[in-house]
Amino acid sequence: MILGRRPIARPGRFFLSIVTLSLSLLACGGERTPPGRLPAGTPGAAGPSVPVLAAGEPAIRVGIALGDSALSVSGHGRWRIGEAGQARPVAVVDGGAPWTIVKLPFEGLLRVRRPDGYLSQPHAGPLRVDPLGPGTLRVDDVPYAGSLEFQLRPDGTLTAVNLVPLERYLEGVVSRELGHPDRAAWEAQRAQAVAARTYALKRLGSRAELGFDVYGSVLDQAYGGIPDPADSLAVRAVRSTRGQALLYGGHLIDAYYHSTCGGSTARVELVFDDPPAPYLVPVSDRRPDGSYWCQGSRYFRWTTALARPELQAMMDRNLPALVPVPPQGVGRVEDVRVERTTPEGRTLSVQVITTTGRYLVSENAIRSLFADGDGRLLRSTQFLLRPTYRSGALERLTLVGGGWGHGVGMCQVGALERARQGQDYRHILATYYPGTEAVSLYR
């Protein structure tokens, strides 16, 4: 989901478990399971009635690191590392310095490096790490509940997966998604817990080819492993709503959410490559007095000004990744125009006119078109273009916009203010996901 956040990247890798605040979306971009019941093979998937999970709380597989050649692992207490499915361990460790899972150049297997530098024999993998007792495990010094699995990807890099009970996973999500709001916003944290649980349940088994269910970043939901003691209110919100998820007509919904809607949420099929959903439709965030629930966000209204050299560099950098361009490249940018908008004011398509052609970019990809040099997406697609011309040539382009994130589903800042004004979590969820109800699927 879900606050326009981005994973922290280090050279040569894409680390997914540590995140900074960015878009919810979302937080919730990436691959999505089509609307419907729980995926095949999930307890409770069959039958026409509400899908209660008879087996109780499920576990979830979270992809916490992708694209590495080495990952450190350590533990508080005693822990075991071995090949998955094999009884004999590679090592049993009592705390101490980190060990390292490595993939050496020109080798298609995994090895384990001890703190003293000794390398194990090669392992086909995956390698499994389990705590032996009440201790916790760490990957690159981030603590995780449950177990860990290290897999070798087809491209020769590592994937680290956290195997964790769903409710423990959610404690690490809610504490990241809403930060540390005041106690008056307690009901918003409960709404976030139910939305995040629904989103996760919908995606169980959806990425089997990758070896996990959800990314541990805003490609799905921001996840920070075991939360800090300062996040106790978020943990309580998860525990107080245990097992509750949102259903529409007896089906789990796609519970998208984002930081700031800017006045109205968006229709899902106009943002993502999803079919229409009756619970993901535009919802006004206007209050009875004419103000907006989310207007306390500093991103409720924003302006981005691009001088001509900056705009040219941006188009040269971003446009070829979004649409086909000729061998000679993007060419000199001559104009940028909004072609279509939604009734709520979100831009549906932008035309970039250059000396080599006219290029159309649509829907949420527009945010990538205007991404800055560090890869930060445009805050939202809710904007107007204000071009400045000199002697008929485009000299400057100013975007005047509102909101942060994709705009679909729950507006997190709006939910926080609604909670402060006395709305409970069920009312907040029913507002942003009309026609849905929160139902207990397990205890």
Image (tube, rainbow, N blue to C red):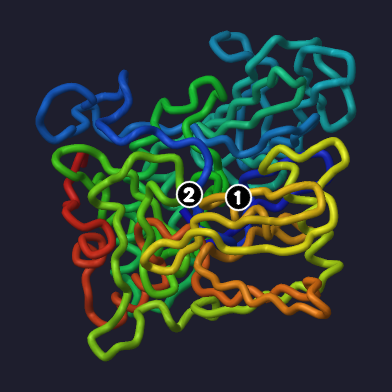
The image position of residue 343, as x and y in percent, is 36, 66
- Given residues 363 and 121, the one toward you in this image is 363
- Vertical relation: 385 (above or below) 128: below
Q: Is residue 415 visible?
A: yes
Residue labelled with disc 2:
28
The image position of residue 79, as x and y in percent, is 61, 30
Q: Which of marks 1 and 2 is nearer the N terminus?
A: 2
Marks 1 and 2, how far apart in space?
A: 20 Å
Quarter of the image with the C terminus in it: top left
Q: Is residue 424 left or right of residue 14?
A: left
Q: Which residue type carries mark 1?
A: Val
- Vertical relation: 87 (above or below) 349: above
For image coordinates 48% across by 71% down, the residue present is 180
For image coordinates 28% across by 30% down, the residue present is 38
Residue labelled with disc 1:
361
- Vertical relation: 115 (above or below) 413: above
Q: Is residue 32 left or right of residue 222?
A: left
The image position of residue 75, as x and y in percent, is 64, 39
- Given residues 309 and 212, the one toward you in this image is 309
Q: Is residue 97 visible?
A: no
**Residue 414 numbered tag:** none
For image coordinates 79% across by 75% down, the residue present is 392
Q: Which residue type carries mark 2?
A: Cys
Disc number lying in front (1 or 2): 1
Q: In this view, does 160 lie to the left or right of 60?
A: right
